[in-house]
């Protein structure tokens, strides 16, 4: 696998470990408790991540299909386009700026912890499979719209890097919400 893609897979796996460590430290009653009226609980943070992955699914599948059609060898080094680079740069925790999410990405009712984590794990496996499927493809030559804003478009390589960074941002938020702050694994 291309080393840059392996780094992304490793980042997805680190997010999974981070979630499992958090879930192991936080009691069930704290897991779903909001730390304030305008702040999400740990459960809501994970639900948001699951909603986000579901929203990216059709966009990524379509972009992978287009990348297969582009043809040609994968570059020696993938590059993010400017929009993708900016999002990739600002997303890691701690959050430098608060961004209000669209209503479609705000969790409504939240499933029990075990169900949320099982869904996260299933979706994590799917995202890792996307990255592995992209190995050898010109994923830097194919753009997709953000499900958060159709005006924001970035290449598929940038998207793959943004997704785990978005996860770490919200897992950091979940750690803060639950009082179980930890260093990033």
Image (spheres, grey):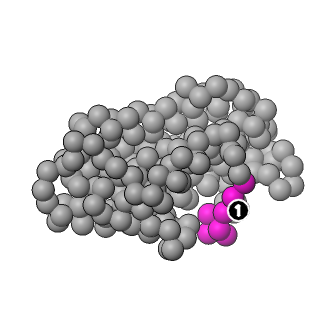
- Label 1: how many residues lie within 10 Å, few (<14), some (14-19) or many (20+)? few
Q: Position of residue 37 (x, y in %)?
A: 87, 55
| Mark 1, secondary structure of its residue | loop
For the C terminus, the image quarter is top right
Q: Does 54 sit above or below residue 8?
A: below
Front residue of 41/72: it is 72
Identify the residue at image location x=23%, y=61%.
Answer: 67
Asked if residue 76 is among those painted magenta in the image, a careful observer would answer no
Q: Does 29 sit above or below residue 112?
A: above
Q: Taking 48 as reference, is 29 left or right?
A: right
Q: Does 100 sit above or below residue 18?
A: below
Front residue of 45/76: it is 76
Q: Position of residue 159 (x, y in %)?
A: 42, 54
Identify the residue at image location x=18%, y=64%.
Answer: 70
Q: Does 71 sit above or below residue 167?
A: below
Residue extending farthest to the bottom is 151
Front residue of 52/47: it is 52
Q: Magenta part mainly helix, strand or loop?
A: loop
Residue extending farthest to the front is 82
Q: Position of residue 38 (x, y in %)?
A: 83, 56
Identify the residue at image location x=41%, y=33%.
Answer: 10
Q: Which residue is mark 1?
A: 100
Please give the range of residues in magenta. Answer: 98-105
Identify the residue at image location x=34%, y=49%.
Answer: 79
């Amino acid at each position: 696998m291309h080393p840059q893609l392996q780094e992304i897979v490793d980042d997805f796996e680190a997010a999974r470990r981070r979630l499992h460590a958090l879930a192991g430290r936080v009691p069930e009653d704290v897991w779903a408790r909001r730390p304030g009226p305008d702040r999400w609980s740990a459960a809501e943070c994970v639900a948001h991540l699951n909603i986000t992955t579901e929203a990216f699914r059709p966009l990524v599948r379509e972009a992978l299909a287009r990348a297969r059609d582009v043809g040609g060898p994968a570059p020696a080094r993938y590059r993010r386009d400017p929009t993708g680079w900016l999002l990739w740069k600002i997303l890691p925790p701690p959050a430098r700026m608060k961004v209000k999410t669209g209503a479609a990405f705000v969790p409504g009712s939240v499933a029990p912890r075990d169900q949320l984590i099982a869904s996260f794990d299933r979706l994590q496996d799917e995202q890792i499979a996307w990255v592995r499927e992209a190995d050898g493809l010109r994923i830097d030559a194919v753009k997709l719209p953000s499900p958060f804003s159709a005006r924001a478009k970035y290449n598929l390589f940038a998207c793959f890097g943004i997704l785990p960074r978005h996860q770490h941002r919200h897992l950091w938020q979940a750690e803060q919400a639950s009082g179980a702050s930890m260093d990033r694994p």
